[in-house]
Amino acid sequence: MALPQSLRTSVTPLELELIASEHLVEIVPLITMEKTAFISGAYGPLRPPAKCRIPLWMATNLKLKKKCHIVAPEWLSVDFLQERLTRETSRPEFSKLPFRFAEIAKVILDVASDDVQNADKIKSLLKDLREARQAKSRDGLQKLDHSELSLPNLCSMEINEIRPFFIQSMGILTQLFREPSAE
Amino acid sequence: MVFLPPPHLASASRPAYAEAYANILVAHRRSPLTSASSVIILVAPDVDALCAAKILAELLKQDDVMHRIIPVSGLADLERMKDELVTYAELHTLILLNMGAILDLSSENWFGEFSMKLTVHIIDSNRPQNLANMFAGGENGERFIVWDDGEAENMGEERKAWEALTYEPEPDSDEDSELDDEDGVRSNEGDDLDDDEEFSERGPSGKRRSLGDGDRSQEKRRKLDDQSTRLSREQRDRYHELIAKYYGSGSWYGQSASATMYILATVLERVDCDLLWLAILGLTFQYTTARISRDAYDKYHSIYYDEVFRLNPLPPDVAANTTDAITAMSPDDLSVRAAEELRFMLFRHWTLYDSMYHSSYVAGKLGIWKERGRKRLTGLLAKMGFSIPQTQQPYAHMDLDLKHQLRAKLDSIAPEYGLVELTYPSFARCFGYRASPLGAADAVEAVSALLDVAGGIRMEVEVEGARHGGEWFGGGRLWEGGRNGEEKREKRIEVGGRQKDGDDDVDADVDCEERKERTWWVKNFWAAYDALSEITAFSIVPLRDALSLAMSLHRAIIRQGTSIIDKQDIRTMRSHRVVVLSQGPDLALFAHPGVLARLGLWLVDALRDRLPGTKIGGLQGRGKKSLPFVVACLNEKTQTYVVVGIMGALDFGDVRRNEFGLAFIEAKQRCNARSRHNTFDASVLEIEQEDLKLFLETLCEVGEGY
């Protein structure tokens, strides 16, 4: 990676987005295509108006050329996100969300916001979710313990955010903890 | 050379736009040497061609076709480009936007010598078109495709005439030598008509005519010999007359190139708001520069109106036609809305007083070049209930209730001052929460200001709020056309260098200047192109800046226009009026044909009611009354005059065919003036300083001769 050494402690969000683009999404194609082999696998055939599952990178490409419509995944809807948000704000643990929901949501909303219902409301719900979860992870970091290593339901962007700090501090904590028992 | 009918007239046997486009794609995908130079788009430097180029580029990009866009400023440039294009081996499609319709493209001078696999598409709104382009067939003919707008259906007569004249065998030439002296008068007439058409090459048919005339006395004998296989003399004459009438009645404009491209996008089912907005800009450009009449505008407007509602459905609770319905509904709202546009120049971005002052319609009716007229303007505003401080506020800061009342008050009070028809239906585009909505006319003003003067001239731009002593450094700042500091530095050196070089007459400097001359408008073209792209990329800052450039351009035009009318600089000749600018603060600015044409249009609008129309007749001597204007401006650097001819119509919203193209060519030949046509428009001419006087006098004679 071409980043300077100081910034190489964790993966950048753009890289995460690239990795997340491998995820399969459903589209309604507007063009016909035979089953074609790509590096990651063979996708197709595309027969409008039947739906088809293709990787997100390919869906983005086709959508930008106006050759398909992306079908929003079922978790990218106002009801689901609203329900998750209420659960998030009412309970102390993290609620279960798709692992790469932030990246996939960003890509889909950037490229195909017209295919998503209520795109504005979804954007504000996603923002609220992020803030709620961020508050929880901040609290969790304060209560770091040398033996606590489980991070239930944390999603890839959030893990990426706390990874450098977490690793370093866990390392120091285990050292600190080991020393008393060594005596 | 075939013409493509528009899709609604297409059938299985007559391919239309979609097939031509599909052929471009097929050629691109199948050719082994495909590179970025396989598809080249040559674009004329006007707003309509620019919009059409953007639409086409978007369509090609979606189909993964590599292409190149090259701006071309005039015929000389086109020739140079053609010489360069001959060397491209992988070129298989050439698209000409708003240029070339009048040229006989299959001749050796143009593209006749290119390889057989080259296809040339001509999408041009200029009329008349060369009939050879439209109707010639054959293997050579199939290479040149003119995208027609349905007018060709009505040209059946011309088609018959042209085909008859081209394909009929020539009369025998051995009998003419005895009869030459009898028909001196007749062949002179024929030569006259041919001289008018320098642009099109009707050489062969003209020659045939003079030969044919020699046969008059042999006619009877000939008729007896073979009546069935030959056209009679009368029929031949009639055909000639028909064709001459088509070419000789002046130039006018057909469907805009961007409308043609939009129709293509519709047929391919790939339209969206951006393409619709570009097509609207092309149409508005044609209307505001008096290229099409109000009726034609209304026709296209209704089509786009339906499209707007199809693509941007309004929520049911918002009324469609209030001027304040143009507010963004959401942060990402990029939709186009229909709105009524007032005829004031840039009225949402300027103070109300200024926009009324600078609009040519109001200027004409109220006579604002005199102090009395300006008082009338303030009087009108006062009557409508707008206090003077309010009218000096930028529109965005005016009181809300005044804005709401503006339309109603104008409708009720303005007719007293003779200002009727102040609004026309138009469109506006929202930009979410990033910026206030932009009207189509304003966007056209901004883009054409960029095309004309974005670089190459020092322009002072007013900073908002500086007017009443708000800024420390005075009222203006220099327009910075370049986007990065490097370009700005380069421009300053250029400007300084050019002013220095103006006095030297070293050859190297002349070359250097020519290269700079050539590149300034290319830079302008790309600045305008980028400004249009910025709209969709959500940051329309360059376009907004261009609005202030357009404002200073208008101010310069008004300054010059009022001084012309004040000093009564307009000389009236028998059939037209002439204005010659040889001094003044903005002379360098008006040396550009685009700006000069705007000045001419302003003068026509301003003086519409005060001057009687004159009949500048067509070839038949039966013209309609119009207001012909010739404006000339001295270009001090090159010691030449730029001359622009404008044919104004007597009614606002009407247009006349511009006959100055033919008149200029004829006058030029009669007096042997050293001159050049630098643009694609025959009514714009650059002439040496010493020849101007003679040229103008010859122009009067030409007018009489009609």
Image (tube, grey):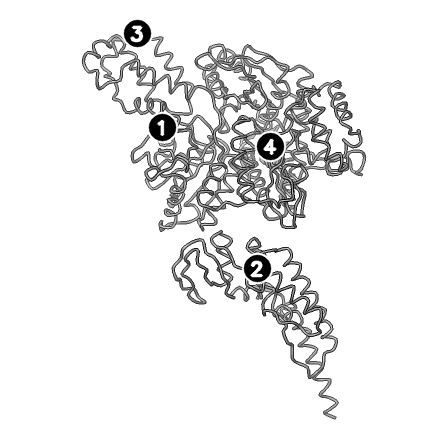
Residue type at mark 4: give it.
Pro
Closer to viewer: mark 1 or mark 4: 4
B10 left or right of A151 in image: left
Estimate the x, y position of residue B486 in percent, counting from the top left: 63, 45
Identify the residue position indicated by label 4 in the image.
Answer: B425
Alpha-carbon span between mark 4 and mark 2? 38 Å
1 vs 2, front mark: 2
Q: Chain of mark 3?
A: B
Q: Callout 1: few (<14), some (14-19), or many (20+) C-alpha neighbours within 10 Å?
A: many
- Circle 2 Cα neighbour tier, 10 Å, few/some/many (<14 / 14–19 / ≥20): some
Q: Bin the neighbour count of mark 4 within 10 Å (Cα to Cα): few under 14, some 14-19, many 20 and up.
A: some
| Lower sequence index among marks 1 and 3 | 1
| Callouts 4 and 2 on one subunit | no
* Residue under pointer 1: B132
- Of badges 1 and 3, the one in the foreground is 1
Q: Chain of mark 4?
A: B
Question: Tag on residue B181?
Answer: 3
Where disc 4 sits, the SS reads strand
Element class at badge 3: helix
| Same-chain status of marks 1 and 3 | yes
Whether residue B46 is visible here, answered yes or no, is yes
Give percent across and percent down for residue B409: 72, 28
Query: Can you identify the residue that label 2 sits on?
Result: A107
Find the distance from the CA under tag 1 to the CA under tag 3: 32 Å
* CB under 8 Å between discs 3 and 4: no
Q: Amino acid at mark 1?
A: Ala
Whether discs 1 and 4 lie on one chain: the answer is yes
Task: Verify CB contact (< 8 Å) between mark 4 and mark 2.
Answer: no
The quadrant of the image that shows the N terminus of chain A is bottom right
Q: Of the residues tagged 4 and 2, which is closer to the observer? A: 4
1 and 3 marks in contact (CB < 8 Å) = no
Which quadrant of the view contains residue B562? top right
